[in-house]
Image (cartoon, rainbow, N blue to C red):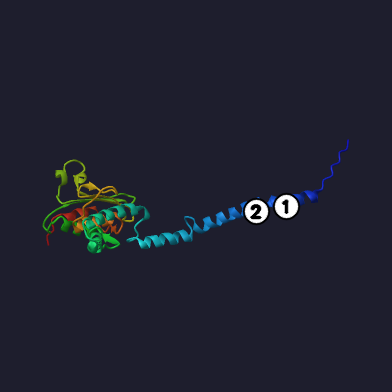
Amino acid sequence: MEITINLDLPGIIAQAVTAERLQPLVDKAIADALKSAINDATGYRSPFSEAIKTQLTDAMPHGLSIDDVAKFQHVLNHALQSAVHGANAASVNAALAKAVEGVVPDLPAVMKMSELLEIARDGFHKDKHEEFYALFEKSGSGYGHLYLHSDSKPGHGYGLDDGKYAAHYRLDFNGKGEVYALKLGGTQVTPASLPNVISRFDATMMGMYVGRTRIEVDMDEYDVRNAAEAQYD
């Protein structure tokens, strides 16, 4: 048995490649190409994305991380609202400027730990011959915890923790010196808390928390304890 099939291949091909049939395929190909090009140009690792990050970082105090804006703005807004409460229009600008300076003072981008301890001594109203509490713990990954208290033995220094959990001040920072958690005056600071910053020491700690300055570790654990002890020439 012989079966013969005659196909008009030129006609079939011509019909298959008509504009009506090809247009959806062309549209999809163009859309896919554009999507790929846009992702390459604006994706996470793209020059465009890096440029945006740089501009945002430059616009924020000392490279304040984008995810820290909320806590920074919350603290600042509270201060501004308190400053202008009951004020007339003529005094609003002056009140705002004063509030910003009081809550987040002008601080360097990086502050050495030794400098912070000097500010702590002054903030605790301790002269050279008086002691306060300072404990520095550093992990192998570079994360650090600095505990400070006006008394040399917070919580009477009982227990295996040496009284550190009774300390009224604690800075938690990563290997880059960026502070990610803060205990201020005995209160754990969060975006929902309303700290009342009144001293240079408190303001410095708050400035670190909101990202205006990082801490540079220029001391070891022994040096930190020694700096908190009575100083004699």
Give the residue displayed 44% in from the left and 62% down from the top.
51
Secondary structure state at the residue bearing disc 1: loop
Give the residue displayed 29% in from the left and 61% down from the top.
110
Q: Can residue 117 be seen here?
A: no
Q: Is residue 30 left or right of residue 186?
A: right
Secondary structure state at the residue bearing disc 2: helix
The residue pinned by badge 1 equals 18
Q: CA distance from mark 2 to mark 1?
A: 12 Å
Q: Residue 190 placed where, x, y %?
A: 28, 48
Q: Residue 180 placed where, x, y %?
A: 31, 51
In which quadrant of the rendered view does residue 36 lie?
Answer: bottom right
Q: Residue 91 placed where, x, y %?
A: 22, 63
Which of discs 2 and 1 lies nearer the camera? The answer is 1
| Number of marks drawn | 2
Q: Are marks 2 and 1 in contact (CB under 8 Å)?
A: no
Give the residue displayed 47% in from the left and 61% down from the top.
48
Depth check, front residue: 231 or 74: 74
Q: Quadrant of the C terminus?
A: bottom left
Determine crowd level at label 1: few under 14, some 14-19, many 20+ residues with C-alpha closer than 10 A: few
For badge 2, the amino acid type reads: Val
Q: Which mark is residue 106?
A: none
Q: Quadrant of the N terminus?
A: top right
For badge 1, the amino acid type reads: Thr
Give the residue displayed 41% in from the left and 59% down from the top.
53
The residue pinned by badge 2 equals 26
Q: Residue 74 placed where, x, y %?
A: 29, 52
Determine crowd level at label 2: few under 14, some 14-19, many 20+ residues with C-alpha closer than 10 A: few
Q: Can residue 122 be seen here?
A: yes
Depth check, front residue: 155 or 23: 23
Residue at the outermost right position: 1
Which badge, 2 or 1, is on the more N-terminal residue?
1
